[in-house]
Image: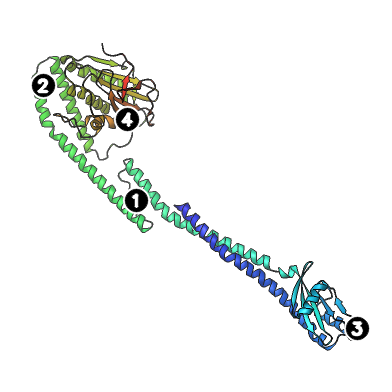
């Protein structure tokens, strides 16, 4: 905006200067010419009275010398009274020009080498005499160059001054807009205390007022949401206490141990939600260097947790790629929640005895987690990814896949749903390691696409379940 305003002002001022300076320069040139020829006419007028009195050569030579000089003036007398034509001074005009003026009887100018000549006719009893006054080119253009230089300097000063004024005006308009942009970026980065000075033009002041009001409302809404989350989480303590007491009376069977561990984990998650909700500032910043967890360790732990239930339901389970450490820029609790959401969907939405597999692929710039099953599949993957939509079954809130999606997108990755080689659903979590956008063509050999029945199918290259 600033440079656009400067360019517009520069163009307009330049056009105005040209529109006035060029005609004015031409007028000055014409005035200098008129001044030079007016001086020549006054010099010729000095000789005219002498010609009306006498035509004596000596006397006329003295008059010419007194009026100008032999180099700058000449007198041409016609022949008559037994006397030949007389020419006094240096003649520069041609005989044809002199004859033409004598015939016409009015003053005229003629171009001569080095300038112009004014030919002034004077009527005498013997005929018409011609007074020739030489006007050099230097006299015609005297002062024109200086005047043009002054006009150019004034025009340049006007252009520079207008550009300076436009630049200051542009700064006055751009700085509030730039502060508004910076404030929006800071607010987007989680700096909820960011506010914009209400300065500048009226439109930008109104925008700053609206931005500050919006920021205040965002802070208030976040505070209300944190309080609501804390209150709702606190209400879960009573049923959790009942579950813990009931789990304590189940005995020492493996299923009882799994139940008690699940209740303890649920209590820990509720406590974490309450503490996070009570914090004064939301955790919106990205994880710093060194933050994250070992995806392989988390995967082994969660598969050990779910393996007991899988064994009870007769499900075949395969885990691949979790034998070596795999560091990812994701908080451990978030990865645990994402894996539990996917594995919980497998148990919830597939019949008992349905096999499933979890594959972990570690690439140079990304880590891929594949959760596939041999169930009936998902008829509408796009609807399944919509937050809060759910599957329509009892207990489905539609938030599980949204948790997975937000975890992947926090690293610059994404989540896709396709068909697995087991015949059911495959959910692919792409976790970007360097924060760049994920490649859309493939996954460096970890997964690939093929066409089956007119639809894109995502599958892994690991061996299938026995």
Seen at 57% across and 66% down, the residue is 20
Going from N to C along the chain, the mark reached first, 2 or 4, is 2
Tag 2 residue: 247
Q: Are marks 2 and 3 in contact (CB under 8 Å)?
A: no
Query: Which mark is in front, 2 or 3?
Result: 3
Classify 10 Å Cα crowding around label 2: few (below 14), some (14-19), many (20 and above). some
What's the CA distance linking mark 3 and mark 1? Answer: 102 Å
Q: Which residue is mark 4?
A: 414
Residue positioned most to the right = 82
Element assignment for label 2: helix
Secondary structure at badge 4 equals: strand
Q: Earlier in the sequence, mark 2 or mark 3?
A: 3
Instruction: Determine the image quadrant of residue 465.
Output: top left
Q: Are marks 3 and 4 in contact (CB under 8 Å)?
A: no
Residue 422: % across, % down: 26, 17
Q: Earlier in the sequence, mark 2 or mark 1?
A: 1
| Mark 2–mark 3 distance (CA, rounded to whole Å) | 153 Å
Front residue of 280/448: it is 448
Find residue 450 and report its horizontal and vertical position in percent. 34, 22
Residue under numbered circle 3? 83
Q: Mark 2 against mark 4, which lies toward the viewer?
A: 4
Q: Are marks 3 and 1 in contact (CB under 8 Å)?
A: no
- Cα distance between the residues tagged 2 and 1: 55 Å
In this rendered view, identify the residue nearer to me: 95 or 213. 95
Residue at which label 1 appears = 196
Q: Residue at x 86, y 77 (%)?
A: 87
Left or right relative to 148: residue 325: left
Instruction: Tell me if I can see residue 294 in this picture.
Output: no
Identify the image quadrant of the C terminus: top left
């Amino acid at each position: 905006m600033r440079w656009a305003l400067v360019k517009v002002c520069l163009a307009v001022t330049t056009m105005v200067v040209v529109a006035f300076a060029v005609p004015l320069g031409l007028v000055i040139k014409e005035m200098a010419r008129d001044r030079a020829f007016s001086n020549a006419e006054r010099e010729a007028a000095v000789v005219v009275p002498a010609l009306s009195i006498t035509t004596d050569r000596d006397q006329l030579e003295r008059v010419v010398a007194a009026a100008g000089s032999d180099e700058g003036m000449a007198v041409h007398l016609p022949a008559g009274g037994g006397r030949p034509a007389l020419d006094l001074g240096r003649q520069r005009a041609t005989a044809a020009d002199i004859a033409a003026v004598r015939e016409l009887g009015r003053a005229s100018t003629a171009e001569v080498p080095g300038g112009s000549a004014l030919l002034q006719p004077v009527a005498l009893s013997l005929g018409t005499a011609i007074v020739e006054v030489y006007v050099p080119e230097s006299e015609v253009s005297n002062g024109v160059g200086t005047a043009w230089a002054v006009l150019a300097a004034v025009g340049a000063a006007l252009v520079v001054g207008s550009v300076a004024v436009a630049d200051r005006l542009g700064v006055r308009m751009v700085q509030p807009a730039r502060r508004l942009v910076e404030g929006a970026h800071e607010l987007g980065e989680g700096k909820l205390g960011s506010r914009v000075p209400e300065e500048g033009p009226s439109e930008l002041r109104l925008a700053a007022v609206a931005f500050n009001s919006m920021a205040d409302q965002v802070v208030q809404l976040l505070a209300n949401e944190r309080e609501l989350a804390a209150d709702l989480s606190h209400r879960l303590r009573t049923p959790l206490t009942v579950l813990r007491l009931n789990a304590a009376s189940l005995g020492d069977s493996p299923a009882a141990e799994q139940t008690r561990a699940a209740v303890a984990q649920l209590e820990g998650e509720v406590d974490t939600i309450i503490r996070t909700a009570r914090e004064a500032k939301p955790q919106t910043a990205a994880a710093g260097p060194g933050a994250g967890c070992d995806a392989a360790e988390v995967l082994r732990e969660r598969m050990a947790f779910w393996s007991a239930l899988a064994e009870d339901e007769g499900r075949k389970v395969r885990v691949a790629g979790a034998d070596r450490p795999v560091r990812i820029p994701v908080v451990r609790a978030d990865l645990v929640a994402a894996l539990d959401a996917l594995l919980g969907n497998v148990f919830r939405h597939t019949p008992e005895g349905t096999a499933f597999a979890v594959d972990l692929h570690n690439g140079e710039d990304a880590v891929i987690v594949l959760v596939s099953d041999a169930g009936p599949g998902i008829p509408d993957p796009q609807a399944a990814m919509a937050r809060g939509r759910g599957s329509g079954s009892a207990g489905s809130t539609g938030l599980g896949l949204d948790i997975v999606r937000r975890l992947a997108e926090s690293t610059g990755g994404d989540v896709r749903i396709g068909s697995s080689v087991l015949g059911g659903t495959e959910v692919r979590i792409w976790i970007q390691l360097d924060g760049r956008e994920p490649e859309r063509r493939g996954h460096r050999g970890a997964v690939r696409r093929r066409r089956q029945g007119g639809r894109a199918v995502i599958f892994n290259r690991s061996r299938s379940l026995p």
